[in-house]
Image (cartoon, rainbow, N blue to C red):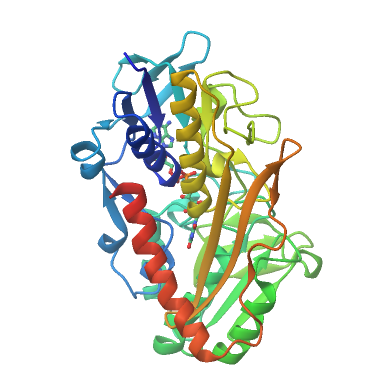
Amino acid sequence: HAGHVIVVGGGFGGATAAKYIKRGNPKIDVTLIEPNSTFYTCPFSNLVLAGERSLDSIGHSYEELKSVFGVNVIHAFAEDIDGVAHKVTLSNGSVLSYDRLLLSPGIDMRWNAIEGYDEAASEKAPHAWKAGNQTLLLRKQLEDMEDGGTFVMSVPADPFRCPPGPYERASLVAHYLKQHKPRSKVLILDSKDNFSKQGLFTSAWKDIYGDMIEWVGVSGDGRVVRVDADKREVETEFGTLHSASALNIIPPQKAGFIADRAGVTNESGWVPVNPNTFESQQVADIYVVGDATLAAPMPKSGFAANTQGKVAAAAIVASLAGITAPDPYWANTCYSLVNPDYGISVAGVYKVEDNQIITVPGSGGLSAADASLEIRQAEAAYAVGWYEAITQDTWG
Ligand code: FAD
């Protein structure tokens, strides 16, 4: 018996880890717990929102993990975890035992952190920060919008899933509006004063969309404190009311609730991990990867979750074999599309030094501010290549 590993969550981190544990040692039994039989990726969901891709084109199944890699996939929800007894309770009533547990549950929304924004309100003012039905709800609002209306987006303070994601979304929404409803506006109400790739986004917005996109930072009264989803109205910190034709509230976030149930979160709502292995600092034999973790300077991205899944998989394989885990390195690139033919990116390589994750000096960086249109077009093509490669690496 080489051991039994349970993986909770079949997204970027969990599906990668399940596959790479099997690749590392096929004799280890791996059980993946994931409620959905199709996973819709947030990456490229902004293209679905803009009408440039179908939802189907960003859906991925677990068939290859099962048939090619021998992962046992159970479509259920993990409801509770006993880290001392090494047991996971599922929504279908069964209780499973593990030697090692890996959690990659992603994020949960902090409902009511913004007054009036709870789960019911998210049906009327979608977050679309988990892809699938939420993406379609927001797409419908965009389609129903009148020419001359305003698409209002509320963006949280750090840390949150996908730092450049809101600004890519604003761009692709503007791309849609420019073609179909050219008198409309995109208003971004932000709870911070700086954002990812800000210089690149703002100069591209000006060039491509003129004054269609307006961004208001926290100092300019950008922090949304109250939402009326029925009226599609928001109120900011200093009492300004904004009404929206389409309303997208991206609320503050925390680790998926199962991390709480496992006792691995701290007071921040996120999970502190041992940087060498991504094992929880608080509960032995539980490894956590992806958005749920505190892994700065790595961002909460699908790419980062994928590389963290590989590092944790190697650490679990080593630990079950009674040997030391290899020294980890991680990489990340976040592409953003300002329109379908205009890409920008930020990249980094990371390692551990003095028990901290650091950016490898001289690695990574941003797309050049003065790059030619050919380079922007090439980066948009690289983004498509990246998507094909990472989804193949994760689920294929
Ligand atoms: P997820 O991928 O969300 O997976 C979590 C899984 O766990 C889900 O399938 C869920 O059903 C399951 N789960 C949760 N709780 C339980 C439970 N109790 N029991 C069983 N299963 C459970 N990243 C990039 O790298 N590049 C991009 O271009 C990019 N674009 C983005 C655009 C948008 C609009 C958004 C919102 C995000 C984007 N991201 C991008 C970020 C990326 O989606 C996340 O960082 C990534 O999904 C994190 O992976 P994860 O494994 O932590 O969580």
Residue 184 picture location, percent across and down: 51, 84
Q: Quadrant of residue 277?
A: top right
Q: Using the image, determine if residue 335 lies above or below residue 66.
A: below
Q: How many discs mark residues in the rendered view?
A: 0
Q: In the image as oriented, which residue stretches furthest toward the top?
A: 85
- Give the image location of residue 362, x and y in percent: 70, 63
Left or right, 364 with respect to 142, comes to: right
Q: Residue at x 59, y 19 (%)?
A: 283
Q: Residue at x 50, y 58 (%)?
A: 230
The foreground one among 84 and 112 is: 84
Decide which of 154, 322 is in the foreground and name it: 322
Q: In which quarter of the image is residue 137?
A: bottom left
Quarter containing the N terminus: top left
**Residue at position x 46%, y 29% in the image:** 102
| 274 lies left or right of 341 | right
Residue 324 appears in view: yes
- Asked whether residue 244 is in view, the answer is no
In the image, residue 198 above or below residue 182: above
Q: Is residue 16 above or below residue 84?
A: below
Picture coordinates of residue 332, whole percent (x, y): 55, 57
In the rendered image, the vertical position of residue 262 relative to residue 11, given as above or below: above
Where residue 352 appears, as percent x and y from the top left, is 68, 42
- In the image, 200 versus 258, the foreground residue is 200
* Residue lying at the far left of the rendered structure: 67
